[in-house]
Amino acid sequence: MSNSNTIFLTGAAGFIGFHTARALMTQGHYVLGVDSISPYYDTALKYARLQLLKDEFPDQFIFVKGDITDRPLMEKVWASATKPITKVVHLAAQAGVRYSLENPYEYVSTNVMGHLVLLELARHQKGFQHFVYASTSSVYGANTELPFSEDHSTDQPMALYAATKKADELMSRSYAHLFKIPATGLRFFTVYGPWGRPDMALFIFTKKILAGEPIPVFNEGKMKRDFTYVGDIVAGILAALNRAPQGDVPHRVYNLGNHKSEPLMRYIGLLEESLGKKAVYNMMPMQAGDVPESFADISRAQAELEWTPKTNIDQGIKNFVEWYKSYYAV
């Protein structure tokens, strides 16, 4: 990516989108960022991320507030780019397994229709090169064979969120087949780190431990997760962006995980250590739509993207706690 491109980046105010925008602009690219600033979690955090991007890269970052399902608006934003858009990093989505039980319409609208709107924009763009999009480890659903490999079946989703992401993979493959749009789907495994999402475990636990409130520990703590540091995820996105799939159907999916299934209680233990404070546990049953363990086989990403995660949870949790304390002036 030596010559600079304008990258169309959705979800630019989001956790992973913010870090990706920063990395792309550090490499010299221009970013045309879109985000609806959904009130799903604290919008002040989203605006703070955007402000940082504007401050650090005043000449490389253009931001438009807008919903990816708004076709006329997206067409207008796309056409407004000073240089033709040849690459998309599509990270905007309604995330979270729990919320999909309460608000299913939001998931199908944003994750399925929004994805289609972007595929159509790419399809009609002359010289379009690569469509990179976020999928999720949740697509493995009821699969019990570990570690999860891209060759495993993903037709037993446990939650609507996973079903919408699987739909995105299928749509992308059909566009790759019909219109030769090179597309890469990245299945993220439990991403955490500085500037993270307040609806995720690390954020919830940190806030509650500091306030002396009990933390919810699901499945009595008998959970294991492949926790992946956001910096490693971003490195994977950049590696993928640089390597568009070839062939008759130019579509590939990759697992981006830490290739380590960590017990939830060890994760909490490291957090307690970093905060210098013990947690009060509220042991609870398994939640609907959840899986007891996730574990990524990353051999395909290692071989084809030359990508390997570098940050273990010991360091990653420390980094998050440092950021949290500084951001919230704890």
Image (cartoon, rainbow, N blue to C red):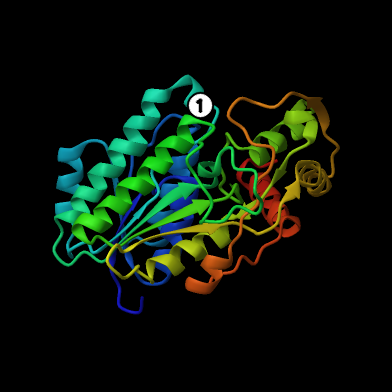
**For residue 6, above or below residue 154:** below
Question: Residue 201 placed where, x, y %?
Answer: 66, 37
For disc 1, the marked residue is 99
Q: Front-most of 274 and 53?
A: 274
* Outermost residue toward the top in this view: 102
Note whether residue 67 is visible: no
Q: Secondary structure at mark 1?
A: helix
* Viewer-closest of 285 and 323: 285
Q: Residue at x 83, y 48 (%)?
A: 273
Q: Quadrant of the C terminus?
A: top right
Q: Residue at 30%, 78% (x, y): give it.
A: 3
Q: Is residue 3 above or below residue 156?
A: below
Residue at position x 64%, y 48% in the image: 145
Q: Point out the residue furthest to the bottom here.
A: 2
Image coordinates of residue 244 in percent, x first then y, are 34, 68
Residue 126 spot, x, y in % from top left? 13, 63
Q: Position of residue 61 (x, y in %)?
A: 32, 58
Classify residue 166 as left or right of residue 175.
right
Q: How many numbered marks are there? A: 1
Q: Nearer the viewer, residue 20 or 55?
A: 20
Q: Amino acid at mark 1?
A: Tyr
Mark 1 packing: few (<14 Cα in 10 Å), some, or many (20+)? some
Q: For the point 51% across and 31% down, which residue is it?
A: 159
Dividing the picture into quarters, in which one does residue 5 lie?
bottom left
Quarter containing the N terminus: bottom left
Q: Is residue 16 left or right of residue 198?
A: left
Q: Is residue 261 visible?
A: yes
Vertical comparison of 220 with 189: above or below: above
